């Protein structure tokens, strides 16, 4: 997609300026990612305060080690991976045991969607979709979140979660299929396009 | 009803992973299964729903400042930092509130500091300035170093100093320009004209300030802007909201004008007059902004009243040969017409004769 390549050029420029201690570029980087990374951290640790601390920690590290930022190949993958690791460390410390990173063993909290005004989707239908996603296995849910909410590519998601892009593809297939099955009944009631907002 | 391959293609399409062949395959599948189209549309809508809330940029900026402060300190021990979120709930919240307030105060102060200084920093130093001009008959579009966009109408000049950057954003305008300013709450963008200064934070607005005309017009499309009378800095600033249009009358600009006794009305007269434009009209159909869409809108003015506009637009000189011509109000949108085509079109509204000789145009009344 087009926006992805412009994003890459933007990041390349930012990296160089940050390496040269440009605070404004660092600020830009922060604004680009803060929200999404906080939500990503929140999905794992499920605490707003902890999520914020984790994001702080990662950005503080970035600035302290800014001179080597240009050696990072894919900054997006780097940031998400750093958030993931820091979040897992946080959980491990609290659970007094090492958390494995497959995400298979703990629940994932997704962010709320904005209210469905002005869309085809009624709030009833939205509930069904959300419920369908909620019932996905944790790893599948995380893949779906990163692809849809954060706009990451299969390759990037694979790199962050340490799975192959093929697995990401398969997980996405499962997610879409599950949603289609869970909301299927709606179509039986409304075969035509007349579901509007309530 | 959605099999695995179908689901895979749908997922690939929405995530931007699908190639041409796959998109084609998906299209065929959708055509063959009309019922699945509905699911496809629902999911497409769902995909676009924003899960990430709107940015609260002030909050986020405060957060950023805290992070930078810690990172700069070098110790990295959160304990060193006065404002650290997690541990002490109530106090920290108060502090954060304070910081937000401080940010806002800083903003207002910087506005005061900037305005008096900026008036003097006008056009005197051509060696260190960039000057961009749109010649008569031409219009220009450019990007300023901070990413803000500027369109210049015919016979207009925009000047900014070499030091223009992300933190000093000041330009001087003579003529008409449309500005789409990149938002930066910390660094106001200032447009200086002969008589007024316009301070903005991040908006889109039009300014018309030709030296030959006695009015300066400012029209706001988005955001908020603040206008000051340079000759009378003590006078209250005027705030504009979207679709406000402010007309500054240069004849009334001097605040110290001697007022004849008993004529208090004149003494109170402000050079500013504010009106609100209809929000229902598209930008392209608004006389103030239609020029951006390469349209010259005659909006109920007579040919004589639009003389200057037409002269600039087509780079011509118009001469009215008798008093009786050019007095009928005209409502007509001109776009890609040549001057000759334009005159032919206008003849339908008001019958007149014309002669074109190079850039000179003569107009006289048609005898019936």
Image (tube, grey):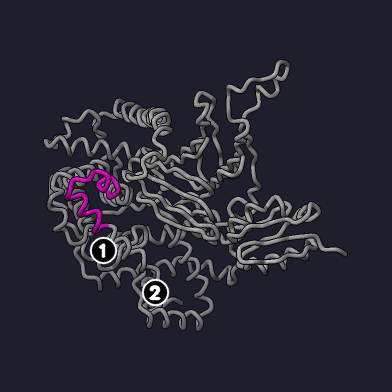
Q: Indicate whether residue A22 is drawn in magenta.
A: yes
> Which of these two is toward me, B243 or B217?
B217
Relative side of A33 to B342, left or right: left
- The residue sitting at 67% across, 53% down in the picture is B307
Q: Chain of mark 1?
A: A
Front residue of B181 and A5: B181
- Circle 1 Cα neighbour tier, 10 Å, few/some/many (<14 / 14–19 / ≥20): many
Which quadrant holds the C terminus of chain B? bottom right
Q: Can I make out residue B165 in this image?
A: no
Horizontal and vertical percent position of residue A38: 29, 47
Is A45 one of the magenta-colored residues?
Answer: no
Pointers 1 and 2 in contact (C-beta within 8 Å): no
In the image, is B254 to the left or to the right of B305? left
* Near-viewer residue (B252 or B361): B361
Give how far across and how far down residue B21 sits, in percent.
38, 83
Q: Residue B247: image x %, image y %?
A: 61, 39
Give the answer, above or below, for where B24 lies relative to B171: below
- Foreground mark, 1 or 2? 1
Give the residue at x 21% y 51%: A17
Determine whether the residue tagged by mark 1 lies in a helix, strand or loop: helix
> Which residue reaches farthest top?
B261
Q: Crowdedness of circle 2 by 10 Å Cα count: few (<14), some, many (20+)?
A: many
Residue at (63% x, 20% y) in the render? B258
Q: Quadrant of residue B4?
A: bottom left
State the residue position of label 1.
A157
Report the span colored magenta.
A11-29
**Residues under labels 1 and 2: Cα distance?**
19 Å
Position in image of residue B119 (x %, y %): 43, 33
Point out which mark residue B7 bears: 2
User: Which chain is indicated by disc 2?
Assistant: B
Direction from residue A144 to residue A61 in the image, left or right:
left
Q: Is residue B12 left or right of residue B324?
A: left
């Amino acid at each position: 997609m087009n926006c992805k390549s412009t994003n890459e050029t933007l990041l390349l420029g930012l990296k160089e300026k940050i390496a040269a201690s440009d605070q404004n570029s660092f600020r830009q980087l922060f604004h680009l990612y803060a929200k999404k990374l906080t939500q990503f951290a929140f999905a794992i640790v499920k605490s707003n305060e902890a999520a914020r601390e984790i994001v702080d920690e990662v950005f503080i590290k970035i600035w302290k080690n800014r001179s080597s930022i240009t050696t990072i190949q894919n900054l997006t993958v780097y940031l998400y991976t750093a958030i993931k690791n820091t979040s897992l460390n946080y959980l491990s410390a609290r659970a007094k045991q090492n958390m494995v990173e497959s995400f298979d063993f703990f629940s994932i909290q997704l962010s709320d969607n904005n209210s469905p005004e002005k869309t085809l989707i009624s709030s009833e239908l939205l509930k069904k979709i959300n419920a369908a996603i909620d019932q996905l296995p944790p790893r599948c849910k995380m893949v779906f979140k990163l692809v849809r909410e954060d706009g990451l590519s299969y390759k990037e998601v694979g790199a962050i979660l340490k799975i192959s892009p093929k697995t990401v593809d398969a997980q996405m297939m499962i997610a879409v299929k599950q949603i289609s099955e869970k909301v299927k009944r709606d179509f039986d009631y409304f075969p035509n396009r007349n579901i509007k907002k309530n | 009803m959605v099999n695995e391959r179908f689901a895979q293609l749908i997922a690939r399409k929405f995530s931007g992973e699908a190639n041409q062949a796959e998109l084609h395959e998906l299209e065929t599948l959708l055509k063959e299964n009309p019922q699945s189209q509905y699911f496809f549309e629902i999911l497409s809508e769902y995909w676009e729903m924003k899960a990430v809330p709107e940015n609260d940029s002030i909050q986020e900026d405060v957060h950023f400042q805290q992070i930078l402060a810690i990172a700069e300190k070098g110790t990295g021990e959160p304990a060193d930092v006065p404002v650290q979120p997690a541990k002490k709930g109530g106090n920290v919240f108060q502090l954060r509130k304070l910081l937000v307030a401080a940010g806002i105060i800083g903003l207002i102060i910087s506005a005061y500091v900037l305005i008096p200084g900026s008036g003097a920093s006008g056009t005197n130093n051509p060696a260190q300035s960039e000057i961009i001009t749109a010649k008569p008959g031409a219009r220009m579009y450019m990007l300023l170093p901070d990413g803000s966009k500027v369109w210049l109408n015919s016979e207009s000049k925009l000047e900014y100093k070499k030091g223009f950057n992300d933190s000093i954003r000041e330009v001087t305008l003579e003529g008409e320009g449309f500005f789409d300013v990149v938002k930066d709450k910390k660094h106001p963008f200032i447009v200086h004209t002969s008589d007024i200064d316009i301070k903005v934070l991040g908006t889109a607005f039009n300014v018309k300030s030709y030296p030959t005309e006695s009015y300066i017009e400012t029209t706001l499309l988005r955001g908020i802007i603040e206008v000051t009378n340079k000759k009378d800095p003590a006078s209250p600033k005027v705030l504009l909201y979207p679709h406000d249009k402010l007309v500054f009358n240069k004849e009334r600009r001097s605040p110290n004008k001697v007022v004849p006794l008993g004529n208090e009305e004149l003494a109170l007269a402000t050079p500013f007059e504010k009106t609100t434009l209809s929000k229902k009209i598209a930008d392209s159909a608004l006389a103030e902004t239609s020029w951006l869409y390469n349209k010259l809108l005659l909006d109920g003015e007579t040919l004589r009243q639009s003389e200057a506009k037409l002269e600039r637009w087509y780079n011509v000189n118009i001469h009215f040969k008798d008093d009786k011509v050019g007095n009928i109000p005209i409502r007509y949108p001109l776009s890609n017409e040549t001057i000759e085509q334009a005159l032919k079109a206008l003849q339908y509204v008001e019958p007149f004769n014309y002669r074109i000789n190079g850039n000179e145009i003569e107009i006289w009344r048609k005898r019936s």
